[in-house]
Image: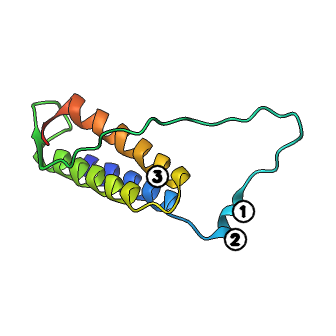
Amino acid sequence: MLSSKIRTTIVVIVAGLSVSAPGVANAAAPVRQSGAAKLGVTVQKMDAPIIKEAGGAGVPGYDDETCGDLAAAYNEAVGYAMGASDSQQEQGFLGVAAHIYGELTDNCLVVD
């Protein structure tokens, strides 16, 4: 249950970031008022290793299957970042990957 919920959440995030059609992106862009503060998140480029294997470390809710799903989602986000068409997309995917990597290293045994 938990692994499918995590996987679904990650797929939705990655799918949302992969929308690259100019018309769609521009239509979804919020209108800024002049003088309004620009909000944004800066994600530093990370050295993103590919995770070879991940397994449970005894943390409740993080069994071998869940950790494996998280590792696959992390690798997928890194792959999308490497193939991103612009730096904004790359930074978005690296942000997702960094979030997943933190969850993995906090709750699972990771071999990278």
Q: Position of residue 23 (x, y in %)?
A: 70, 71
Which residue position is annotated with label 3?
90
At x 78%, y 32%, the residue is 37
The residue at the point 10 percent across, 31 percent down is 58
Q: Which numbered disc, 3 or 2, marks the residue closer to the eye?
A: 3
> Is disc 2 in contact with disc 1, using a CB cutoff of under 8 Å?
yes
* Circle on res. 23: 2
Return the x and y of residue 109 as percentages of the image width and height.
11, 35
Which kind of residue does numbered mark 3 sit on? Glu
Instruction: Give the residue type that dot 2 points to.
Output: Gly
Secondary structure under the numbered disc 1 in the rendered image: helix
Amino acid type for the residue under numbered disc 1: Asn
- Cα distance between the residues tagged 2 and 1: 5 Å
Query: Which residue, as the protein is rendered here, is positioned at the far right?
Result: 34
The residue carrying pointer 2 sits among few (fewer than 14), some (14 to 19) or many (20 or more) residues within 10 Å by Cα, namely: few
Image mark for residue 26: 1
| Residue drawn where x is 50% and y is 63% of the image | 85
**Circle 3 residues within 10 Å: few <14, some 14–19, many ≥20:** many
| 62 to the left or right of 17 | left
Q: Secondary structure at mark 2?
A: helix
